[in-house]
Amino acid sequence: MRSKAFGFLAFAAGLAILVIALKALNWFPLIAQKDLMRRYGDYEEMRTALGIRQVFVPSYFPEDFRWPPTGILAQGKPYPAVIMEFERSGEGKPGEIGMMIYQAAEDGFSPGGPLVISRIREQATYPLKGRSAVLEVGSGVKGEPCSRISWREKDLRITVLARLTPFELMKVAESMLP
C-alpha cells in the first residue's frame, strides 16, 4: 500500500516537473525575440519595451470610444508596427471592437483581426491637413457600415478603420495630426 502511494507521488511530481519545464520552454522565444508582434498591457509599456518614439493617437474620439485603447499589439521587427483596438462603450454594442488605428513602417501592413472592410463601395483621395489620404467607404463582414482612411506620415503608413460614418472618421484622423 505504501509503495503504491509513493509511486503515485513520484508520478505526480514527475508530471508537475514536466509541465513546469514545458511552460519555461514556451517562454524562451518571447524572451529571445521580444520585438516580434505581441499584446501589451498599456501604451507606455509598449513604448518602453520596443523603444517606439512616436505613435500617432487621436485627440478626438466619437461619443462611444474612449482613450486608452482596450487592446494594443506591437512589434519592433521585422519593422515597427502598432495596432490599437478600441471597444464601443456606448449604447451601440458594448465590448465590440469598433475602431482600429494602426501604423507601420511598411506600406503593405494589414493586421486583419476583428474589424475589416469586406466590400468597398467608394474610394476617393482626400486632402488631410496637407497630406494626401485615401478614404474608403464600405461595409463590414456583417453588412455594417465601415470606413477606412490611410495616409503616409514621414516613414509611417497610418490607417484608421472604424464602424463610423466617413465624416466622423475624418474628424478622428484630423485630430491625430498637428
Image (cartoon, rainbow, N blue to C red):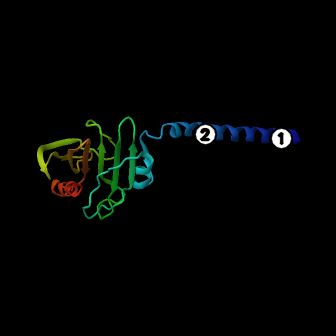
Position of residue 62 relative to residue 46, above or below, is: below
Query: Picture coordinates of residue 54 (x, y %)?
Result: 32, 50
Query: Picture coordinates of residue 45 (x, y %)?
Result: 44, 53
Q: Is residue 77 left or right of residue 119?
A: right
Q: Is residue 147 left or right of residue 51?
A: left
Identified at 17% across, 42% down, the residue is 120
- Ranked by sequence position, the earlier of labels 1 and 2 is 1
Asked where in the image residue 13 lies, by quadrant, the reply is top right
**Nearer to us in this view, 116 or 107:** 107
Find numbered disc 1 in the image and state the secondary structure of the residue it sits on. helix
Query: Picture coordinates of residue 21 (x, y %)?
Result: 64, 38
Task: Give the amino acid type for the residue marked by disc 2 in the picture.
Answer: Ala
Residue placed under numbered mark 2 in the picture:
24
Identified at 32% across, 41% down, the residue is 112
Residue placed under numbered mark 1 in the picture:
6
Q: Quadrant of the N terminus?
A: top right
Position of residue 89 relative to residue 24, above or below, is: below
Q: Residue furthest right?
A: 2
